[in-house]
Amino acid sequence: DQQVKQNSPSLSVQEGRISILNCDYTNSMFDYFLWYKKYPAEGPTFLISISSIKDKNEDGRFTVFLNKSAKHLSLHIVPSQPGDSAVYFCAASFTSGTYKYIFGTGTRLKVLA
Amino acid sequence: EAGVTQSPTHLIKTRGQQVTLRCSPISGHTSVYWYQQALGLGLQFLLWYDEGEERNRGNFPPRFSGRQFPNYSSELNVNALELEDSALYLCASSSQGLPYNEQFFGPGTRLTVL
């Protein structure tokens, strides 16, 4: 049972345009969400997070939106740059208890120059 | 500051063999997490160790086990290897003192089972 889903395995975007990566989850008890970026041959690196008490968090070119009623979050990258080309994983967690992350299957973003 | 390190980088084993993967967390981090990333799948949570004890494990058979040492480094052991164990094994560490226990990942160990 995949509790965190990324239904788009890949996405291509022109440089300078907006990239929107989507993520859906099924467990309403998740209260903390994260996005990680992964380059080939490297471990995932933390990008941005959002607590369930917020609906938006912004960090430079990266903004994460959370829609709790729809159990949906999205990552917006504006403007997209070729260096953003990577696999993006969303993850959900609880802020108490197990501390484990439940990851989605990832979306491969390719930013075209 | 050194990041999370893992060894070996790559490993090739045959079915039925046993393997041990190693992870050194960031200095000061007490929690270590193990994840499996099989082809086409996301990162699947395997194990969480904190202060030398296993705190949680994912939906993996008992032949996946591990331990955490007093210096907080960790080993992941997989017995009776099967073909489907071929995957990238990622280790992450976190500090209980950080907000929401952000996890920092190592580069992973690529295991191939033939």
Image (spheres, rainbow, N blue to C red):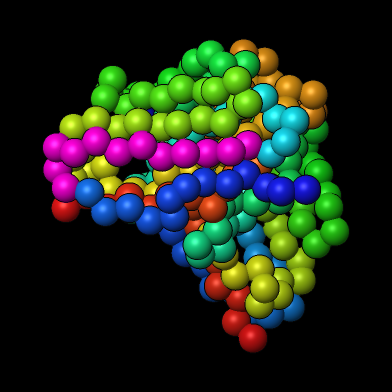
Query: Exactly how many numbered labels are in the figure?
Result: 0
User: Which residue is depicted at the point 14% across and 37% down?
Assistant: B16
Q: Is residue B114 left or right of residue B44?
A: left
Q: Residue furthest front?
A: B70
Q: In this view of the protein, which residue sits in the foreground, B84 or A28?
A: B84
Q: Is residue A92 left or right of residue A9?
A: right
Query: In this picture, is A2 found above or below A29?
Result: below
Decide whether residue B20 is among the magenta residues.
Answer: yes
The answer to whether residue A67 is seen in the rendering is no
User: Which residue is depicted at the point 41% across and 32% down?
Assistant: B76
User: Which residue is depicted at the point 64% across and 86% down?
Assistant: A113
Q: Is residue B49 left or right of residue B12?
A: right
User: Residue B61, located in which quarter of the rendered image?
Assistant: top left
- Residue B94 on image: x %, y %: 68, 31
Query: In this picture, is B41 found above or below A69?
Result: below
Query: In this picture, is A91 found above or below B61?
Result: below
Q: In this view of the protein, which residue sits in the foreground, A45 or B113?
A: B113
Q: Which residues are magenta?
A: B14-25
User: Which residue is depicted at the point 52% across and 23% down?
Assistant: B68
Query: In this picture, is A56 found above or below A11?
Result: above
The answer to whether residue A97 is seen in the rendering is yes
Q: In this view of the protein, which residue sits in the foreground, B50 or B37?
A: B50
- Residue A99 on image: x %, y %: 61, 23
- Residue B15 on image: x %, y %: 14, 43
- Residue A106 on image: x %, y %: 49, 52
Q: In this view of the protein, which residue sits in the foreground, A12 or B99?
A: B99
Q: Residue furthest bottom?
A: A113
